[in-house]
Amino acid sequence: MAFSEDTKRELARVIPEERCCRVAELSAYYDFDGFLFGDGKYLDFYHFTPLIARKILTLVKSVFPTAQTHVLAHRARARKNQVYTVRVSGPEEARMIHAAFRNQSFADAERRILASVCCRRAYIRGAFLGRGSVTNPKKAYHLEIFTEKYEVAEKVLHNINAFGLEARMTTRKGDLLVYLKDGDDIVTLLNLMGAHNALMHLENVRVEKDMRNRINRLVNCETANVEKTIQAAVEQIDAVERIRKHMNLSDLPPKLAEIAALRIENPYATLKELGEMANPPISKSGVNYRLQQLIKLSKSLG
Ligand SMILES: [Zn+2]
């Protein structure tokens, strides 16, 4: 969980420069947990952690400086810690903010993909800060954002995938879950949201994991080679033993006799080593050729 919290702490400090993006980020909090009520007199950003509530308040004040704001503390049943509601009071301000959220321009109105890339990034950041989490990359590559509202889940999904990522949607205990499982996609999304420290951490873990995998592959490969060598030696020794049942090794042509004897005496030696023991020394392929002849001979003897 620490990785997720660190990522959020980092993102909570990211204040978009442009007004459009501030509105976009606020609209994400509002989409997930916002209400206009009391005949349009109040607008709430409902139940956020202190970290996020503070950010919402900062953004609201910077974009709508005339808005009257209050912060209400609750002790939520489902959560252990105190949560906060940021409330905007006054019919004009509440309606104005509500209208600003509704009047954002969309590149794709039906799927509600925000028109500007900058705003799309801000929206995703808000969604993640409000309702997202990311798993420690040492355990798994997994980033998710949840909501109980279908149209919000779809909006998040489409805005993420507008960047060429492959987020998917599923359900969990009545909630809709938009999630990413691919390490590359998660890195890209962290980058888009502006979580550069988190991104760096994830990349380091990836390099470490990758290195470990590569070492494991090498070790496995080496083991496979050793096994192959041993198997070959067993076959060669079998061949010599079978020949021995039919004749004395000394009856073989001298070059074959020499290698047959060396193989029996040095069951663990590699072909190269056997070649060096021969008198005069011969190449690895020379050793192989003679051993193949011995195997052929043994087969012909039955
Ligand atoms: Zn923008």
Image (cartoon, rainbow, N blue to C red):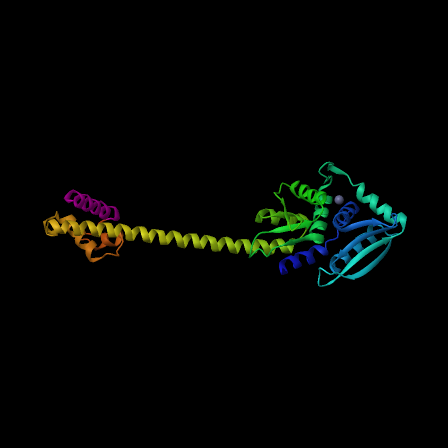
> Does residue 298 show up magenta in the picture?
yes
142 sits left or right of 231 in the view = right
Dominant secondary structure of the residues highlighted in magenta in the image: helix
Q: For the point 89% across and 51% down, which residue is it?
A: 90
In the image, what residue occupies the spot 73% across and 41% down?
Answer: 116
The residue furthest front is 174
The structure residue drawn at horizontal position 23% and vertical position 53%, both measured from the top left corner, is 274
- Say left or right for 194 vs 261: right
Where does residue 18 sit, x and y in percent of width and height?
A: 77, 47
Q: Whereabouts is ligand 1, in terms of quadrant?
A: top right
* Residue 288 in the image, given as x and y percentages of width and height: 24, 47
Residue at (68%, 56%) from the top-left corner? 8
Q: Give the range drawn in magenta.
A: 283-302
Q: Horizontally, is 286 left or right of 227 in the view?
A: left
Q: Taking 68 as reference, is 223 left or right?
A: left
Residue 285 shown in magenta: yes
| x, y percent for residue 241 | 17, 52
Quarter of the picture holding the C terminus: top left
Please state which of residues 203 and 95 is positioned toward the viewer in this rendering: 95
Query: x%, y% of residue 37?
Result: 85, 49
Q: Which of 58 and 108 is in front in this view?
A: 108
